[in-house]
C-alpha cells in the first residue's frame, strides 16, 4: 500500500480543474474510495456528549477510485476530485479486499481512523504544466551532419563519399540544414509532427557537442537565415522543431576557454569553469591529473560553472535568443542530470516568460522523478522504456509479466500529464541502432515499436530506422542516411507510416488509457481502455508475433 500527498501521487490538474489522487495497492483489493472534505468544515449532529454538549462531525464526501494500471500483483487506483469550496482538503482511503474486509489507509498507515493525508490548498502556480501540443507529437530525430547534403558549397574540404564512406569519430559527410529543408516532404510523408535536431551551433566536430559559439549556426550547416527558413517551413508542414542545447560543458575552442588557457588565473573567465588549480593546459594524458571538471574526462570539454552569474546569464541569453530569433519550439538539454537544479530553475522561468508552451526535454537516462516532479523539465529522453522493450522483444531477458510490472512501476513515478509527453525512443545517436539491437529481426523490431507507439508519451524515430538502417554505437549509429530507394527496406517504411497513422487515430485513447494485463497460456494481452473505447495488444510468446486489435 502506498500513497504520498505530493507528486506524482497527489496533484492539481489545471485542465480538468481536479485534484488527482493515486494509490498503489496489492491486487487483492476489490474496491477503493476516497473519503475527503474541508479539514475545517464541521457540522452539528443530533447527538450530545456525556456533558450534554452538542456533538459535531467532520463533513465528508466519498468518491470511487478506478483501477488505472492492473496486473497480476498490483493495482494503481486513480480518482479525480472536485476541490472543496475552500480549495483545501484532507482525505483518507477506504478499501475493501477480496474477502470483504474493510481497510482504512491514511498518512500513518493502515488501520488508524484519524490518520489523514492533506492537500493544504490548491495553488495553480504549483501545479504541473506542459505544452498542450507535446502529447500529440510524433518525433523524428536528425543528426544533421549525416542526414542530407543540400548545399555542397558549405561542406568541409575533406568529406567522405556519402554512399561509400565509413562513419568515424572525426570525419565529415557534408550534411546541412538545406538537406533537411529539401527532405521535409519525405519526413511529412511518414506522418511525423516534430523534428529534433542534435546540435547545429558552431563547433569543430561532426557532432557539435563541443560548441565554440552559442550564438551562431555552424557554417558547414548554414546560417541563421537558413535555420529560420527550416523552422518556418516545418511549421507550415505541421511540425514542431526542437534543438539541442549543451550547458553542461563548453567546447575547447570557445573564446572563453581559450582566454583561460592563455591568461590562466588572470583570465576574467576563470570562474566560468570548475578549475581546481593552476596552471592548466589543453590536454592531459592521464585523466586523474586533469585539474578541472570536464564532461566524461574529455579535456577539450571543460564543465561550465553555472553558479557563476555571468556564465549563467550567457547560457540563458543563448537559450532565449534562438526562441526569439527563430521561433523554435523546444530544447533538448544535453547531460542535464549533471547541471544544478538551481540553474534549470532559472532556465525554466526564463523560457516560460518568453514562450509559455515551450518544451524542455532533459537527457536523463535513469529515474527522472526529481527533474519532472520538481517542475524543471517537461520530459526526458525515455531510454528506460526502450530498455524494457528491448529486454522483452529483442533479447527475451524478461517475461511479459515482468515487463508489465516494470512498466507500471515507471508509469507510477510520474503524473499523467508527464507520462503523456515523455520523449519515448528505441534508439538515438548515442545508442546501437534498433534493428542491430534486434539482431536484424524485423518482426521483433515491429513488436517493440508498435508497443512503444501505443504507450503514453511522445514517440520518436531516429533517422534511417524507418528504412532498415543498422549500426553499432557511436560512430556506427551515425552513418549517412540511405537515400537510394533500392537500398531501403520498403516494408519497414510502410510499417512506420502505418504505425504513425494508427497512433494519430487513437492518440486520445492511448494518452488517457487505463491499462490492464492478463496472460492465458501463450497469449499475453494488454487492454487499453478509456470510456467505451479500447485497444488490445496481443502477443503470442510462442510465435513471437504482436498484433493490435482496435
Image (cartoon, helix red, strand yellow):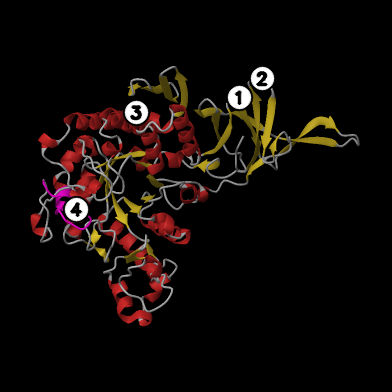
State which mark lies toward you, 1 or 3: 1
Tag 4 and tag 3, C-beta contact below 8 Å? no
Q: Earlier in the sequence, mark 1 or mark 2?
A: 1
State which mark lies toward you, 4 or 3: 4
State the SS at label 3: loop
> In the image, is residue 244 above or below residue 310?
above
For the point 44% across and 42% down, which residue is it?
418
- Marks 2 and 3, how far apart at CA: 38 Å
Question: Along the horizontal axis of the image, is 9 left or right of 536?
Answer: right
Q: Is residue 504 visible?
A: no
- Marks 1 and 2, how far apart at CA: 8 Å
Q: Where residue 362 appears, x then y in whole percent?
A: 39, 51
Q: Which residues are magenta?
A: 164-180
On the image, numbered disc 2 is attached to which residue?
99
Q: Earlier in the sequence, mark 2 or mark 3?
A: 2
> Mark 4 Cα within 10 Å, few/some/many (few <14, many 20+)?
many
- Marks 1 and 4, how far apart at CA: 55 Å
> Mark 3 Cα within 10 Å, few/some/many (few <14, many 20+)?
some
State the SS at label 1: loop
On the image, numbered disc 4 is attached to which residue?
145
Residue 506: numbered disc: 3
Q: Earlier in the sequence, mark 1 or mark 3?
A: 1
On the image, numbered disc 1 is attached to which residue?
28
> Mark 2 Cα within 10 Å, few/some/many (few <14, many 20+)?
few
State the SS at label 4: helix
Q: Quadrant of the C terminus?
A: top left
475 or 47: nearer the eye? 475
Q: Quadrant of the N terminus?
A: top right
Main SS class of the magenta portion in the image: loop
Question: Along the horizontal axis of the image, is 102 left or right of 373?
Answer: right
Q: Quadrant of residue 3?
A: top right
> In the image, is residue 289 above or below residue 490?
below
Amino acid at each position: 500500500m502506498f500513497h504520498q500527498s505530493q507528486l506524482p501521487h497527489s496533484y492539481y490538474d489545471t485542465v480538468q480543474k481536479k485534484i488527482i489522487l493515486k494509490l498503489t495497492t496489492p491486487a487483492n483489493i476489490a474496491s477503493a474510495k476516497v473519503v475527503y472534505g474541508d479539514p475545517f468544515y464541521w457540522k452539528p449532529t443530533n447527538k450530545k456528549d456525556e456533558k450534554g454538549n452538542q456533538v459535531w462531525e467532520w463533513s465528508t464526501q466519498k468518491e470511487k477510485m478506478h483501477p488505472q494500471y492492473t496486473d497480476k500483483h498490483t493495482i494503481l487506483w486513480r480518482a479525480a476530485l472536485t476541490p472543496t469550496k475552500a480549495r483545501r482538503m484532507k482525505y483518507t482511503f477506504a478499501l475493501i479486499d477480496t474477502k470483504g474486509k474493510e481497510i482504512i489507509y491514511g498518512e500513518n498507515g493502515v488501520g488508524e481512523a484519524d490518520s489523514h493525508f492533506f492537500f493544504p490548498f490548491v495553488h495553480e502556480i504549483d501545479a504541473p504544466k506542459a505544452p498542450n501540443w507535446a502529447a500529440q507529437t510524433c518525433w523524428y530525430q536528425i543528426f544533421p551532419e549525416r542526414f542530407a547534403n543540400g548545399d555542397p558549397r558549405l561542406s568541409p574540404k575533406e568529406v567522405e563519399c556519402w554512399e561509400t564512406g565509413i562513419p568515424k569519430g572525426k570525419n565529415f559527410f557534408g550534411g546541412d540544414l538545406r538537406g533537411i529543408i529539401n527532405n521535409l516532404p519525405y519526413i511529412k510523408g511518414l506522418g511525423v509532427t516534430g523534428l529534433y535536431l542534435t546540435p547545429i551551433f558552431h563547433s569543430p566536430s561532426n557532432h557539435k557537442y563541443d560548441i565554440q559559439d552559442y550564438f551562431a549556426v555552424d557554417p558547414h550547416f548554414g546560417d541563421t537565415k537558413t535555420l529560420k527558413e527550416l523552422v518556418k517551413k516545418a511549421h507550415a508542414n505541421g511540425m514542431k522543431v526542437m534543438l539541442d542545447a549543451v550547458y553542461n560543458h563548453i567546447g575547447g575552442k570557445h573564446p572563453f576557454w581559450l582566454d583561460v588557457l592563455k591568461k590562466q588565473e588572470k583570465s576574467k573567465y576563470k570562474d566560468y569553469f570548475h578549475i581546481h588549480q593552476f596552471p592548466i593546459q589543453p590536454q592531459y594524458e592521464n585523466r586523474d591529473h586533469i585539474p578541472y571538471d570536464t564532461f566524461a574526462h574529455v579535456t577539450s570539454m571543460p564543465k561550465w560553472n553555472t553558479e557563476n552569474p555571468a556564465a549563467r546569464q550567457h547560457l540563458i541569453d543563448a537559450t532565449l535568443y534562438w526562441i526569439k530569433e527563430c521561433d523554435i519550439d523546444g530544447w533538448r538539454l544535453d547531460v542535464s542530470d549533471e547541471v544544478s537544479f538551481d540553474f534549470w530553475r532559472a532556465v525554466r522561468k526564463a523560457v516560460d516568460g518568453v514562450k509559455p508552451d515551450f518544451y524542455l526535454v532533459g537527457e536523463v537516462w535513469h529515474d527522472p522523478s526529481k527533474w519532472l516532479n520538481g517542475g524543471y523539465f517537461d520530459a526526458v529522453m525515455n531510454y528506460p522504456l526502450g530498455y524494457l522493450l528491448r529486454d522483452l522483444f529483442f533479447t527475451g531477458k524478461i517475461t511479459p509479466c515482468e515487463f508489465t510490472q516494470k512498466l507500471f512501476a515507471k508509469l507510477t513515478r510520474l503524473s499523467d500529464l508527464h507520462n503523456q509527453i515523455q520523449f519515448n525512443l528505441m534508439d538515438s545517436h548515442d545508442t546501437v541502432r534498433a534493428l542491430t539491437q534486434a539482431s536484424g529481426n524485423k518482426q521483433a523490431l515491429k513488436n517493440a515499436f508498435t508497443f512503444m507507439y501505443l504507450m503514453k508519451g511522445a514517440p520518436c524515430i531516429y533517422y534511417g530506422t524507418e528504412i532498415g538502417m543498422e549500426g553499432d554505437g557511436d560512430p556506427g549509429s551515425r552513418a549517412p542516411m540511405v537515400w537510394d530507394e533500392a537500398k531501403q527496406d520498403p516494408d519497414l517504411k510502410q510499417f512506420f507510416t502505418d504505425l504513425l497513422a494508427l497512433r494519430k487515430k487513437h492518440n486520445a485513447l492511448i494518452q488517457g488509457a487505463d491499462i490492464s494485463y492478463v496472460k492465458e497460456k501463450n497469449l499475453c494481452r494488454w487492454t487499453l481502455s478509456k470510456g467505451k473505447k479500447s485497444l488490445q495488444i496481443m502477443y503470442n510468446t510462442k510465435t513471437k508475433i504482436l498484433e493490435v486489435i482496435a
